[in-house]
Image (cartoon, helix red, strand yellow):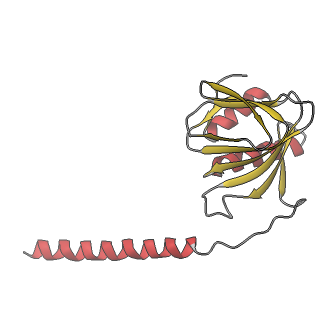
Amino acid sequence: MCYTIEWSNQRLTSNLNSERQKAERRKQMTMLHPKLVGSQAGDRVLVLGEPRRFLLTPEETNGTFLLFETTTQPDKGVVAHRHRAEEETFYVLAGIYDVQVGDQRTIAEAGACVFVPRGVVHAFKNIGQQVGRMLVMVSPGVDHARLFRMLDAHARAGNPPSLEETAALAYQHGWEIVSS
């Protein structure tokens, strides 16, 4: 009988702690602040020679997503890869892209939207004659943001990693490169 009472008290204490933790998480989630990012604002990072402009970071969205704008020179893009723990959505703002998602290929022009679930191989290439632009949302985006900042730091230090080093860094951040 004493054992049961102790167990019940421990369970009650555990439930109270769990409820306090949930309440604290809810409180943190409500601490999001509105943010307006002007057309020239946002942290800029350089990833393999292509600029990315962070609009909303996982730090600002309680780890729920990363939103960034990317520009792609003609005949450039991202090799086939997959993300172990992130979904990615691309919205084409300008340009013409050849996009691969899984076994499907499509031409995506301004106004097109492409969703890539985690684990699905994807790639894109700007096949137009002009610089292309896309708005990209990654959920949760924490790995993306860390990798992009790391690659940017290397580039700014004058020590950009080789493609092999980039692939190894990408793997550490949840990416798997499937072709070059």
User: Residue shown at 79%/68% (left/top)?
Assistant: 36
User: Residue shown at 59%/44% (left/top)?
Assistant: 86
Instruction: Please tell me in which quadrant of the rendered image residue 48 appears.
Output: top right
Q: Residue furthest right?
A: 130
Figure check: 19 above or below 94:
below
Q: Residue 19: image x %, image y %? A: 38, 74
User: Residue shown at 44%/71% (left/top)?
Assistant: 22
Q: Residue 41: image x %, image y %? A: 87, 61
Q: Residue 130: image x %, image y %? A: 92, 35
Image side of residue 36 versus residue 80, left or right: right
Q: Nearer the viewer, residue 140 or 73?
A: 73
Q: Nearer the viewer, residue 70 or 173?
A: 70
Figure check: 118 above or below 63:
above
Instruction: Please tell me in which quadrant of the rendered image residue 79 appears.
Output: top right
Q: Residue furthest left?
A: 1
Looking at the rendering, in which quadrant would you find the N terminus? bottom left
Q: Residue 173: image x %, image y %? A: 64, 42
Figure check: 24 above or below 64:
below
